[in-house]
Each structure stands twice: as C-alpha cells, then as structure tokens.
Amino acid sequence: MFSGWNRLLLSSIVMFLVTGCGSSDQPELGQVYGTITMDDAPLAGVEVLFGPKGARSSAGYTDAEGQYTLYYLAGVKGAVLGEHRVEVRTPIEDESDPETEANFVENIPPKYNSQSELTAVVKAGDNPIDFNLKSN
C-alpha cells in the first residue's frame, strides 16, 4: 500500500501535526544512524523505532542498503539520550483476499518488534548503531 518513503513521509507529517513546529522544550538529542541486516543481508524498507522510557520515540526507515537515520520530529534528526527499547518492523500487505481492507503480515521475528529484545544506548553526538538480526 505505502512504500517505505511514503510511510516515512506520512509518519513525519503526523508527528509534525501532533507536536507543531517544535519548541525550546526539546530534549538533548544524539544523532543515530546505522545498518539493519537479517542473516548478514541488508533489510530494505523496514521501520526502525527507538523508544526511551517516558519520552518521545524516534523513527526511521532503511534504504536499499539497509541504512537508516532516526528522526525525533519531522525534519529533526536524532533520538533522546539514554537507554532505548528498539523495534524493527517490516509490514507487508497481505493480498490473499482482494475483497478486504489491507491486512499486513510481519516478516521480522517478534523478538525484534512486538516482543523486542533489542536495546541501545544513545549518547550525545554521533551514534552509529547497527543490528544484524537472525531469522531463526
């Protein structure tokens, strides 16, 4: 239904509308980027979410090489400093029944999204954070 870039644009617009143009209350952010692979192969078009306790999550999407950059708000790169629970998701439209609304099937194991075991610590400055996920 939506390509990775369309989902990122839609997510960015929603975040912008919910938060407005930002404010001076914005927390200190670290710049987070990296590569997501599955069994050593790049994962393209996956959503990457970094969720700190008690603060706004940051999100990004991987490109064809599996590389991502996190955004705190529309046009604002980064993630809140501290420990994060990380989720990697790949919703793909299930087209088995064209008569129903879009139904999405997750191709990434639950231990990386709904039951994520992934964590990361974001520090001030640059944070290159890569994840090599295993399919089993």
Image (tube, helix red, strand yellow):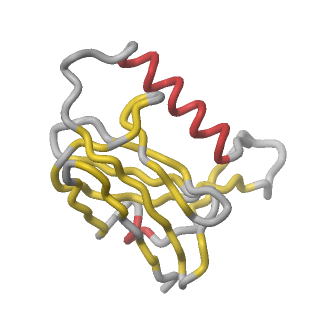
Question: Could you say where residue 8 lies in the image, as x and y percent from the top left?
Answer: 57, 39
Identity of the residue drawn at 53% across and 74% down? 37
Question: Could you say where residue 59 lies in the image, as x and y percent from the top left?
Answer: 43, 44
**Residue 107 in which image quadrant:** bottom right
Identity of the residue drawn at 63% across and 52% down? 104
Going by the image, does 29 lie left or right of 115? left
Question: Could you say where residue 87 lies in the image, as x and y percent from the top left?
Answer: 39, 58
Q: Which residue lies furthest to the right in this view?
A: 98
- The residue closer to the viewer here, 85 or 93, is 85
- The residue closer to the viewer here, 78 or 119, is 78
Up the image or down, 29 lies above or below 92; here it is above
Identity of the residue drawn at 60% across and 55% down? 91
Q: Residue furthest front?
A: 125
Question: Could you say where residue 50 lies in the image, as x and y percent from the top left?
Answer: 33, 51
Up the image or down, 134 lies above or below 5; here it is below
Going by the image, does 84 lie left or right of 50? left
Identity of the residue drawn at 26% across and 64% down? 119
Up the image or down, 94 lies above or below 133; here it is above
Up the image or down, 123 lies above or below 23; here it is below
- The residue closer to the viewer here, 83 or 24, is 24
Where's the N terminus, which quadrant?
top right
> So how many labels did they put on this image?
0
Going by the image, does 67 lie left or right of 21? right
